[in-house]
Image (cartoon, rainbow, N blue to C red):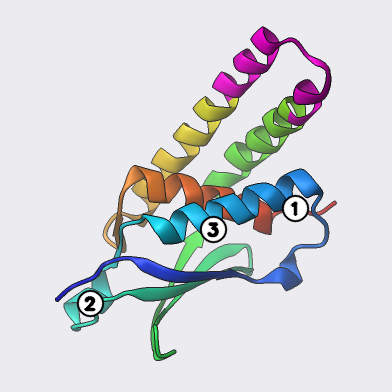
Amino acid sequence: MADYRISNISLDDSTILWRNADVEQERRVAIFDLIEENTFKPVRSAERGAHGPYHLALSVRDDRLALDVTTERGDELETILLGLARFRRPIRDYFAICDSYYQAIRKATPAEIETIDMARRGVHNRAAELLVERLEGKVETDFATARRLFTLICVLHIRG
């Protein structure tokens, strides 16, 4: 029976030079939520008979996002590469709005925090839509999974 989902995810920590407590918490929550509920069907692997669940390792290689997909036993299935050029602005915008949000939760009014949080969700949603579009034909996924994956892509881009 097919089980098209991610059961384990890892990030290439060698590309992450620095992260603060807020970012670390977002990473933990994104991974926890992703493992709890996701839809992830690597098209080529599924066509060759791999029906999940999958382990996924995210890294950045030569300015491309690499999604290394393996079976739970560690058998390599495929590596999906996505150019990161179209993600540069959404990542930059997401970092900027997150900085504003983290500062606001420490000293702003509830109304100000809510306004910034709405803007943060908007940036995040547009980036998730872009990720779904870029994965088309490579991975079938849902919006919630794409949102969590985008969070993890951002973590890979933290340079301190």
Mark 2 vs mark 3: in front: 3
x and y, in percent, of residue 159 in the image: 80, 54
Is residue 7 within the magenta segment?
Answer: no
Q: In front here: 137 or 147?
A: 147
- In the displayed structure, would residue 79 be above or below residue 35? below
| Circle 2 SS class | loop
Identify the image quadrant of residue 4: bottom left
Number of marks drawn = 3
| Circle 1 SS class | loop
- Segment tinted magenta in the rendering: 102-119
Circle on res. 31: 3
x and y, in percent, of residue 122 in the image: 50, 26
Residue named by callout 1: 158
Q: Is residue 24 left or right of residue 89?
A: right
Q: In front here: 41 or 62?
A: 41
Residue named by callout 2: 51
Circles 2 and 3, Cβ within 8 Å, touching? The answer is no
